[in-house]
């Protein structure tokens, strides 16, 4: 019937599209899901072939004999063949070979899930990139086993949520290495300005996560100080707020109206009376915040941070709230949640709760899963922990007007039903990373037998005790790091003097001073358990040994 025309790709594609147009929406969604799984299986097969080719090339290179000229390594040979076969640049082909080798030798369990179609390449690629700094074979095997056991529950997760989950596993499994990498990055922190040729300049740099989060919040605060008639976009106002922040001023409104509500009056100053006060939300376990726990935390607006950073933020905070919100029956009948309940919901969800959405919770709406009944609030849809979740404006409108249904379970899991009847489950990212037992979200308040002033004094005293307990720990760590650095510098100096003695004199020193110059060279790296000796009274400087 088709004759030779069946081999024409354009005819085959046109026929395929005609066949798909005849399917109903539910069948089309099923085709999307099945082809997505098949794509994962095909990628796994391709990566396995690349890994096997790499093994062949490395084995043949090991059997070859030198011919008097430089040999190209097995990795380079494999990358060249992959580049030609897939029409990739040398750099892109090198990434393919490196990823294939990682799945073959470092993450075999994750590779098996990809081969079964139980995960996708986006997730696997994130795991490869976020675990590539783990060098210990036992630790990477432990990470591979942990992620493979959990990856089956990641369907519908956004990219940022997958990154958070992988980072949490890495920091829990190898906290020392994560801490060393963070300290090394802190030593390289910087901020620079790059002038452009259009009258603008580019800011770049690397700063601490807490500083970046506070800076981001502060710019948003300044950008919202103008009236609604300001013609600038939010991005433009944030850029202009940088100059206002540097000068300690409020952001001036550019609406041009004489009756602008944000315009300063006669004799008023445009100084910002609020100062640089921002609220930073950190999700962590009680043991991490108040004890010596090593479980990581989550800095809202940034991502996963290690336990030491959590305690440093807690020690430096002007005030800290650790209590869980308790919603009274009267508060549950109000449409607007309390500030404490809203903060808790955002810290629990961390992102929009629609499948695959990574919009930060701080920029989302607080949605009632069961709609709030404005005519009769007691009839249902109460404002409680179990009925609230974060939705970005797009998915909030999609739920309201797009035919999507949702049902929220007691643990915060949301079960979504698409217009075609497909179901998707999303769990709260905060509770998944840092599970914490909770009491009932809506309970009658206990009788208050203490005055408000006494309760406030008790909270202040508790916070001060907490800060006093953390200060010695942090101070001891800083003193140890300073002592280690001082010892390494001293050893390098002594080794340098020994080298100079050999160069200048060529024989041991006979001077009664600085007799250590005749000792063997000292190692310039300290063991992990090194501690400084007991302090002794410093003596006067000695004369040079030569």
Image (cartoon, helix red, strand yellow):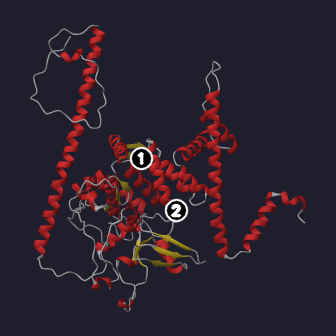
Residue tagged by mark 1? 201
Residue 405: x %, y % from top left: 51, 79
Q: Relative to 341, is 367 on the left or the right?
A: right
Residue at position x 77%, y 62% in the image: 13
Q: Relative to 295, is 86 on the left or the right?
A: right
Up-down relation of residue 460 to residue 423 (above or below): above
Up-down relation of residue 343 to residue 503 (above or below): below
Residue at position x 53%, y 56% in the image: 123
Residue at position x 79%, y 60% in the image: 10
Sort mark 1 into few (<14), some (14-19) or many (20+) by Cα contacts within 10 Å.
Answer: few
Residue tagged by mark 2? 152
Query: What element does badge 1 sit on?
Result: strand
The numbered dot on residue 346 is none
Place residue 250 in its image quadrant: bottom left
Task: Give the number of callouts.
Answer: 2
Of the two numbered discs 1 and 2 on the same chain, state the one appearing first in sequence. 2
Task: Name the one closer to the observer, 506 or 141.
Answer: 141
Task: Name the one closer to the observer, 155 or 12.
Answer: 155
Look at the numbered discs 1 and 2 and tell me whether their residues touch, using CB distance below 8 Å.
no
Sort mark 2 into few (<14), some (14-19) or many (20+) by Cα contacts within 10 Å.
Answer: few
Residue 298: x %, y % from top left: 35, 58
Please name which of the two marks, 1 or 2, marks the residue nearer to the observer: 2
Residue at position x 29%, y 68% in the image: 263
């Amino acid at each position: 019937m088709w004759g030779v025309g069946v081999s024409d790709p354009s005819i085959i594609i046109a026929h395929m599209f005609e066949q798909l147009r005849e399917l109903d929406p539910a069948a089309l969604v099923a085709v999307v899901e099945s082809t997505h799984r098949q794509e994962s299986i095909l990628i796994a097969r391709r990566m396995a072939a690349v890994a096997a080719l790499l093994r062949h090339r490395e084995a043949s290179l090991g059997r070859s004999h030198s011919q008097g000229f430089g040999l190209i390594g097995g990795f380079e040979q494999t990358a060249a063949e992959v580049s030609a076969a897939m029409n990739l640049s040398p750099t892109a082909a090198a990434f393919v070979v490196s990823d294939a080798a990682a799945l073959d030798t470092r993450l075999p369990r994750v590779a098996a899930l990809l081969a079964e179609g139980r995960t996708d390449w986006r997730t696997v690629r994130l795991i490869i990139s976020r675990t590539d700094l783990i060098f210990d074979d036992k630790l990477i095997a432990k990470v591979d086993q942990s992620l493979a056991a959990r990856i089956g529950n990641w369907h519908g997760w956004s990219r940022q949520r997958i990154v958070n989950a992988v980072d949490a596993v890495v920091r829990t499994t190898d906290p020392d290495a994560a801490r060393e990498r963070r300290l090394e990055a802190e030593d390289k922190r910087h901020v620079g300005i790059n002038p452009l040729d259009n009258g603008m300049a580019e800011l770049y740099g690397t700063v601490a996560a807490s500083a970046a989060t506070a800076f981001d919040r502060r710019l948003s605060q300044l950008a919202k100080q103008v009236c609604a008639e300001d013609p600038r976009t939010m991005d433009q106002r944030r850029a202009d707020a940088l100059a206002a922040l540097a000068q300690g001023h409020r952001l001036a409104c550019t609406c041009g109206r004489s009756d602008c509500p944000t315009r300063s009056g006669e004799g008023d100053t445009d100084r910002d009376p609020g100062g640089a006060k921002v609220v930073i939300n950190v999700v962590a376990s009680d043991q991490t915040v108040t004890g010596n726990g090593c479980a990581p935390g989550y800095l809202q607006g940034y991502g996963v941070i290690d336990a030491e950073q959590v305690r440093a933020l807690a020690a430096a905070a002007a005030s800290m709230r650790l209590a869980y919100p308790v919603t009274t029956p009267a508060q549950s009948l109000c449409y607007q949640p309390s500030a404490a309940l809203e903060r808790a919901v955002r810290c629990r969800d961390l992102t929009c709760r629609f499948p695959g959405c990574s919009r930060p919770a701080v920029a989302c709406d607080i949605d009632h899963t069961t709609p709030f009944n404005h005519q009769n609030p007691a009839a249902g849809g109460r404002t409680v922990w179990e009925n609230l979740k974060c939705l970005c404006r797009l998915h909030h409108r999609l739920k309201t007007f797009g035919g999507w249904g949702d049902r929220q379970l007691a643990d915060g899991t949301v079960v979504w039903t698409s217009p075609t009847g497909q179901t998707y489950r999303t769990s709260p990212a905060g509770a998944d990373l840092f599970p914490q037992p909770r009491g009932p979200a809506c309970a009658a308040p206990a009788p208050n037998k203490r005055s408000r002033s006494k309760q406030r004094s008790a909270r202040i005293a508790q916070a001060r005790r907490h800060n006093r307990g953390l200060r010695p720990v942090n101070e001891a760590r800083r003193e140890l790091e300073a002592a280690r650095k001082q010892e390494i510098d001293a050893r390098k100096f002594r080794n340098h003097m020994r080298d100079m003695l050999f160069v200048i004199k060529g024989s041991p020193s006979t001077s009664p001073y600085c007799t250590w110059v005749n000792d063997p060279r000292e190692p310039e790296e300290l063991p992990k358990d090194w501690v400084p000796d007991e302090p002794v009274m410093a003596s006067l400087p000695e004369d040079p040994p030569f």
